[in-house]
């Protein structure tokens, strides 16, 4: 909440100007602290999402490797297509949005 002072309401203009300045700075400080807190929360969420995405990517790569080296027989072609598509999608996403942001 911003407080608006009227210069005509006071007898000492210097004190009122100083008070206005102090109030404005306190309000800006509060706004800045709220913004910093929100930014910290969002950064933590982004880091958590990146960790989850990297874990998913690792699992898909593991599935892809298991699929290629399956000793008991042939994996259905539909399963192969889904695994390969998901691996390619996650690979591109990780490269563009996670590894690319590290540079």
Image: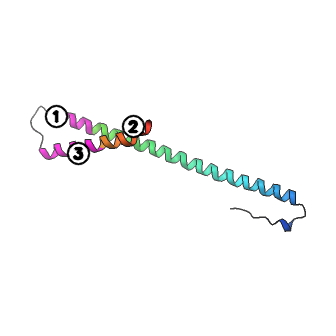
Question: The residue tagged with tag 3: helix, strand or loop?
Answer: helix
Q: Residue at x 25, y 45 (%)?
A: 86
Mark 3 or mark 2: whose residue is earlier in sequence: 3
Mark 1 surroundings within 10 Å by alpha-carbon count, few (fewer than 14), some (14 through 19), many (20 or more): few
For residue 95, side relative to residue 16 (left or right): left
- The residue sitting at the bottom extreme is 8
The reply to whether callout 1 and callout 2 are in contact (CB within 8 Å) is: no
Magenta span of residues = 60-89
Q: Image point 70% across, 55% down: which residue?
A: 27
> What secondary structure is the stretch in magenta mostly built from?
helix
Distance, label 1 to label 2, CA atoms, is 26 Å
Q: How is the image coloured?
A: rainbow
On the image, the x and y values in percent for residue 91 come to 30, 40
Secondary structure at numbered mark 2? helix
Residue bearing mark 2 = 99
Q: CA distance from mark 3 to mark 1?
A: 14 Å
**Tag 3 residue:** 85
* Mark nearer the N terminus (1 vs 2): 1
- Residue 68: numbered disc: 1
């Amino acid at each position: 909440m911003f407080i608006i002072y009227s210069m005509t309401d006071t007898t000492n203009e210097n004190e009122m100007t100083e008070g206005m300045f102090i109030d404005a700075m306190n309000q800006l400080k509060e706004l800045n602290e709220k913004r910093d807190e929100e930014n910290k929360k969002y950064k933590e969420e982004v880091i958590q999402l990146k960790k989850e995405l990297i874990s998913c990517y690792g699992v898909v790569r593991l599935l892809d490797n298991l699929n290629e080296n399956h000793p008991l027989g042939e994996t259905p072609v539909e399963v192969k297509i889904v695994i390969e598509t998901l691996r390619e999608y996650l690979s591109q996403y990780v490269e563009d949005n996670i590894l690319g942001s590290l540079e």
